[in-house]
Amino acid sequence: MATYNTAGVCAKEIDFELKDGIVTNVRFNGGCPGNLQAISVLVEGMPSEEVIKKLKGITCGQKSTSCTDQLVNAILEQMKKKQE
């Protein structure tokens, strides 16, 4: 299980697993519960590259990022760690 501390959004952190390029067990801590629970269900079992492609760059209101964009950052960070 990886934990990512978010920046610039309502959710404070994201817990998730990334195994063999597949995203599972996503849980946002804080933020809009209904929306983020739905995102977690929608990305469950999805290849990381597909999550990145679909969610990268999404913003929330006037913010330059969103909880889903932060999930992309979390996945990218975890992918980088696994390559090291």
Image (cartoon, helix red, strand yellow):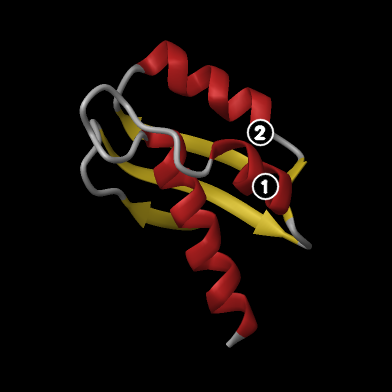
Instruction: Kindly identify the residue that appears in the image at 51 percent across and 49 percent down.
Output: 72
75 lies above or below 78: above
Locate the C terminus by quadrant. Answer: bottom right
Query: For mark 2, what is the residue?
Result: 43
Query: For mark 1, what is the residue?
Result: 23
Confirm or deny contact between disc 2 and disc 1 (CB under 8 A).
Answer: yes
Q: Which numbered circle lies on residue 53? A: none
SS class, disc 2: helix
Amino acid type at circle 1 is Val
64 on left or right of 73: left
Residue 59, position in %: x, y? 36, 32
Instruction: Kindly identify the residue that appears in the image at 29 percent across and 48 percent down.
Output: 6
Q: Nearer the viewer, residue 29 or 74?
A: 74
Residue 25, position in %: x, y? 61, 40
Q: Nearer the viewer, residue 83 or 25?
A: 83
Instruction: Kindly identify the residue that appears in the image at 65 percent across and 45 percent down.
Output: 53
Asked where in the image residue 69 lies, by quadrant, the reply is top left
SS class, disc 1: strand
C-alpha gap between disc 2 and disc 1: 7 Å
How many labels were placed on the picture? 2
